[in-house]
Every structure is written in structure tokens, then in C-alpha cells.
Image: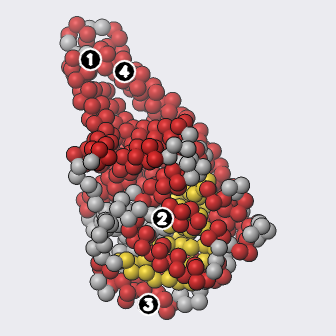
Amino acid sequence: MESQRLHRLTEIIPGALVWTTILGAALLSYFAPLVAIYFIILFDLFWFFRIVHFLFFLAVSARHYRHDIKIDWLPITEKDPGFDKLYHVVFLPTVEEGVEILRDTLENLATSRFPVKDKVIVVLAGEARVGEEFPDKAKILEQEFAGRFFRLVVTVHPADVVGEIIGKGSNLNYSARQVQRLIDELGIPYEDIIVSSFDCDTAVHAQYFANLSHKFLTHPNRLRSSYQPVILFSNNIWDVSPPVRVASFGTVFWLFGELSRPEKMCSFSSHAVPWQALVDVGFWHPDIVSEDSRIFLQCLFRYDGDYEMTPMYVPVTCDAVVGETFWKSMVNLYKQQRRWAWGVEHFPYMIEEIQKHPRMPWRKKLYHLWLQTEGMYSWAVAPVLIFMLGYLPLWFAPTSIKEMAFFQNTPHTLEALMRLSLTGVLATALLSFFLLPPRPQHKKHWDWLVMIFQWALVPVTFILFGSIPAIDAQTRLMIGKPLGYNVTAKSRKT
């Protein structure tokens, strides 16, 4: 009973912090506008320096990316000790995706610059809750790709399992347990297997498996690290709406900035984990939404802090969110961002795990708790604070304050800080052109102009599809209204 009360309290804390900040900013603007003005100038200055700091690491990661994608990694990793014994397992959870998307994904894996026929086990993990649709698709794909992988395994996750929620985590948990039986039958040592957890639309760079093999085999403590590739939402990037493109590139640039600071990283979306680590933690949790980042935390606590992230600068590409209409795309984008923001569910988990692992250094406990908490908090409040405090104190200030020279110069000061901050938008916009795939034939030359002017949407996008869905997620956790798992729609014109 005591543990339940503690859990409920820790669910309230993140949302309470967010709403205390927002309401406090509004009250401060009304009752102490001069203090609010001082605060917002310092806050904007802080975020300008934070943007400069971010751009430095973004440039470092971009340099590594340009270097690593040009290297033929297979001859290098073939010389690594243990390569002959190494196997890859690739999980592809799927629900309602069409056979064309699944076929494209399998074809991409099969044509990698790597001996996939001898070393890669692909797991097509479907859901029983969609009826006979998945088994029919699986039969087609099994026939088409017979003999092209070391094994092509098809699993069907049962519906309505007690203690699970509908989602990728429960599917992965079930399919991993089925694959464990196969691995035991084949007699493959657990320490010789590295697992890639993908979305069903994930396309790997030709060098992905070779680069991952090299990272894994040369890591000094390879079983105590997850491996995070660059993720580009570029499979259909030319066909989605401008707000979706801006939000998708925002996620890409965030990940780029994190890759060159691996001590701050947590696994995100497509990632790789040692099979031994998965077995040790009991695989992915089946009752959560954010299974991609939770698996890192599971390993971190299981090994008392002796676990880390290793960056990969060879990319995988995924679909950007879509919809049948523009407005449906906006709804789907909001739901996707809210689902990612539901990573705030890790806060209660971390508080509970901190108490269970006395051998884990307190410095590491607090550091990772701070990273998770500050990241979710800033995601929710930073854009709102900049917008609110940039205007409310100016509206509510009494005449005596409005006559002050400092007050009259405030709009110019804030405008100057915003112009300086726009250098970050310019830098990321330029990098986005470097990351774009070639223009498809069905797109016109003038579509390049849309790609340029779409970056004017950054302020609106950061609030509507950044701050607000993050506030939504943390508020839901605070009031005890769990967020279910929504599947991102997949659709391509080519």
C-alpha cells in the first residue's frame, strides 16, 4: 500500500512542476512584471548559449556522420576477433502495415553490405488482434524471402494478455521469448548476438550491420552497452506536409546533438541491444508505451550503473508521420509527439529502482534522474515560457514601469536575442538539405522553395507539436489518465 502511494506521488511530480512553472510565470507577469522581465531576459540569454552549445555538438556529429557513411565497414569488421561467431537478430513489430512496406523493409535488409544469409535472423512480429490479415501477409513474404536470411521467423502476439498493454513493448516481449527458444535450439551463445529493434518501416544503410558489428566487437565492455544509430525520417519526407518535416528534422537534430555526448544518451526508436542484456532484464516491459528508452534504463539499473550508450553514425531511415489529409497529418503528428513525450512514465520507475539498487553509485542515480526529468521538463515549458514571458509582463506592467527606460528597451533586447537564436534555425535548415534524399520524380523543382520557407514554421511547430503535447502527456500522468499506444501511420507514394 505504501509503495502504491509513493508510485502515485511520483506520477504527479513531473506534471505538477510543469503547471507550477506555467501558472507561476503568469502570476509573476501580473503581480511583479519587472521581475518577470528580468527573468525572461536572463532565460532567453541562457537558451541562446544553450543553442550555441547544441550547435557545437551537432557539428561534431555531422562531421562523424559524413566520415562514417563513406567507409566500407565490412572488410574492417571481418578482421575483428569474434566476427565469425557473431549473429544479428532484427525485430520488426508490425500491426496494420501493408505488405508493400514490409516487403521494402525486408528487401532493404536482404541487400545490405553484409552476409545476411549467414548471420542475420529477422523476426516479423505480428499481432493476433488484427485477425487473419497478418498471417496472410507473412505467408507471402516467407515465400518471397525464403533463403535470403539465416532465419526468417514469424511470431503472432496473442491478444488480450493479462498484465500487458497494446503496443510495441508487449509485442517485442512476446516475440523475443519465442526467438529465445530458437537460439537455444541452434546453440548460439548469448554473448555472440546483437539485437536491432526496429519499426517495420525502418530501412538500414548498406553499412549498418557491418558498422554495428565493428562497434560491438571492438567495445571494451560490449555486453554492457546499447548502440544508437542516426535516425532519419526521410523515407517519405518529400511527400509529407511542411509542419511534419520541420518536426521530424527537429527530432533528427536532437538525436544528432546527443550522439556526440553519449553519457547523456538514452536509447531512442531504432536501437541495438546485446542479447545477453535483454535476457538478463527479462526483455522489454510489456506494460509501457516508451519501450525504446525504458530498455536502456532496465539495463542501467540491472547492472548497477555499469551500462552505457555507444553512438553509431551510420543511419537508419524511417517514415515521417502522415495522414489522408493535411489535418489528419497534424493530428497524427500531435499524437506521435505526445507518445514520445510519454517517456515521462520513466520518472516513477526510476524513483522505485533507485531504492532497489544500493550498489549503484548515487552520483550516477541522480545524474540519470536529472537527465530524464530536466529533458521532459524543458521540452514542456521552455517554448511556452519564452512566448508567455515575452509578452505578458509587457501587457500587465503599470504605467510607472512602462515609463522606465529599461522597460522601453526590453522589446528591443528580446528581439535581438531572438535574432541571435535564429542562427540555430539557419544552421539546422542548412543541415537538413544535406540530409534530404534525392528529389523524387513526382516532385517539381519548385518544391525546393517549400523546403526553404518551411523553416519559418519553427516557432509555431515547437509550441503546437513540441511543448503542448509534452504538457498533455505530463498532465495525463499527473491526473492518472494513462496514455495508450497509438501506431504511427505508414504511407508512401513511391
Residue 330 makes an appearance in the image: no
Callout 2: few (<14), some (14-19), or many (20+) C-alpha neighbours within 10 Å? some
Q: Are marks 4 and 2 in contact (CB under 8 Å)?
A: no
Q: Which residue is mark 2?
A: 282
Q: Secondary structure at mark 1?
A: helix
Colour treatment of the image: secondary structure
Q: Which residue is mark 4?
A: 39
153 horizontally vs 241: left or right: right
| Residue pictured at 22% horizontal, 52% vertical | 481
Residue 211 in the image, given as x and y percentages of width and height: 67, 64
Residue 313 higher or lower than 190, as above or below? above
Residue 156 in the image, given as x and y percentages of width and height: 39, 80
Q: Amino acid at mark 4?
A: Phe
Callout 4: few (<14), some (14-19), or many (20+) C-alpha neighbours within 10 Å? some
Foreground residue among 442 and 446: 442
**Quarter-of-image position of residue 87:** bottom right
Split into 4 quadrants, where in the image is the C terminus? bottom left
**Rounded to the nearest whole Å, what is the CA distance between mark 3 and mark 1?**
66 Å
Callout 1: few (<14), some (14-19), or many (20+) C-alpha neighbours within 10 Å? many
Residue 65 makes an appearance in the image: yes
80 horizontally vs 232: left or right: right
